[in-house]
Amino acid sequence: MGLVRPAAAATASRSVALVTGANRGIGLALSTVLADKGWRVIATCRDPAHADELKALSAKHSAVTIDRLDVTDIAALDALAARYRGQPIDVLINNAGILGDPDAQQLGRFDQKTFEDVLRVNAYAPLRVAQAFLDNVAVSQQKKIITLTSRAGSIAVVDQAHDFYFYRMSKSASNMSMRLLQNDVRPRGILVALISPGPVDTEMNREWRRGAPPPTSLQSPLQSAAAVVKLIEQLTQETAHALNYDGEELPW
């Protein structure tokens, strides 16, 4: 059951979004922006009991429902999908992700378990979440599946990078999986898009910098989320399906 309140029936006048990893950072910001715009939000995270900011958002917005979900727990994922069977989900947002131990992703120190964990969360889980809620998206009005990606996964802009092997690989793999998924679900009218939220001041970004000063272009989570939501609302089947938060096409 949802931690805060049972799910309410969707109405024709209110769009519905499901967000993974909604307890902090961009996921929390996306949930906030959507709720402020009048959406009904199914906000999922691994540990709702300690998601204080998300609980505060749900207390403020009655249309925000919190559900427990570890995206790597397939049994729990399928059980949650069964609970929402038949309910339209206009926009499914795959936001949950991990960076992984930076030291375990360096040449000469590669760690297999870190590799498996990062690829499981960042590459396999978004695809499996999309599969679990595919029928919900198919019966909605907007029919959109969004996966947050990163320039870190772009082969075209890797330049002289020599860090975060596993994280970068996981994003490249997720990009490919979403392109394949789009091919499969296009006949059902479902749009699958990849969006990079840009440089954002999150805990993950601070882990990435490892003590280095933040870039001047760093956005707040709410700034990035507002741009991402605006872009999601404008997406059509004719739109490029790998985009930066500002609408520019993301290099592959």
Image (cartoon, helix red, strand yellow):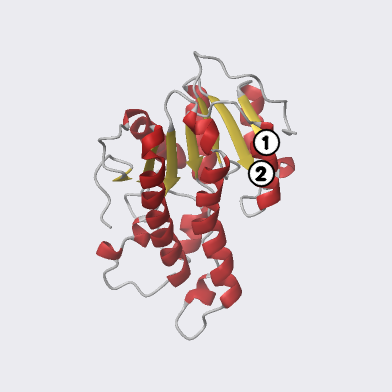
**Considering only vertical position in the picture, is 176 above or below 241?**
below
Q: Quadrant of residue 136?
A: top right
Q: Position of residue 176 (x, y in %)?
A: 38, 57
Which quadrant is the N terminus positioned in?
top right
Which quadrant is the C terminus positioned in?
bottom left
Residue at which label 1 appears: 82
Residue sitting nearer the eye, 231 or 103? 231
Residue 196 shows in this picture: no
Q: Residue furthest bottom?
A: 108
Confirm or deny contact between disc 2 and disc 1 (CB under 8 A): yes
Instruction: Give the SS element for disc 2.
Output: helix
**Considering only vertical position in the picture, is 133 above or below 139?**
below
Q: Quadrant of residue 83?
A: top right
Residue at horizontal 63 percent and vertical 31 percent from the top: 85
The circle drawn on residue 111 is none
Q: Identity of the amino acid at label 2?
A: Asp
Residue at which label 2 appears: 78
How many residues crowd around disc 2 within 10 Å: few (fewer than 14), some, or many (20 or more)? some
Residue sitting nearer the eye, 202 or 112? 112
How many residues crowd around disc 1 within 10 Å: few (fewer than 14), some, or many (20 or more)? few
The alpha-carbon separation of the residues under discs 2 and 1 comes to: 6 Å
Q: Position of residue 220 (x, y in %)?
A: 43, 42
Residue at horizontal 34 percent and vertical 34 percent from the top: 231
Q: Position of residue 112 (x, y in %)?
A: 57, 76
Residue at horizontal 60 percent and vertical 22 percent from the top: 63
Q: Identity of the amino acid at label 1?
A: Ala
Instruction: Give the SS element for disc 1.
Output: helix
Residue 178 shows in this picture: yes
The tally of labels here is: 2
Q: Position of residue 49 (x, y in %)?
A: 74, 41
Residue at horizontal 37 percent and vertical 61 percent from the top: 153
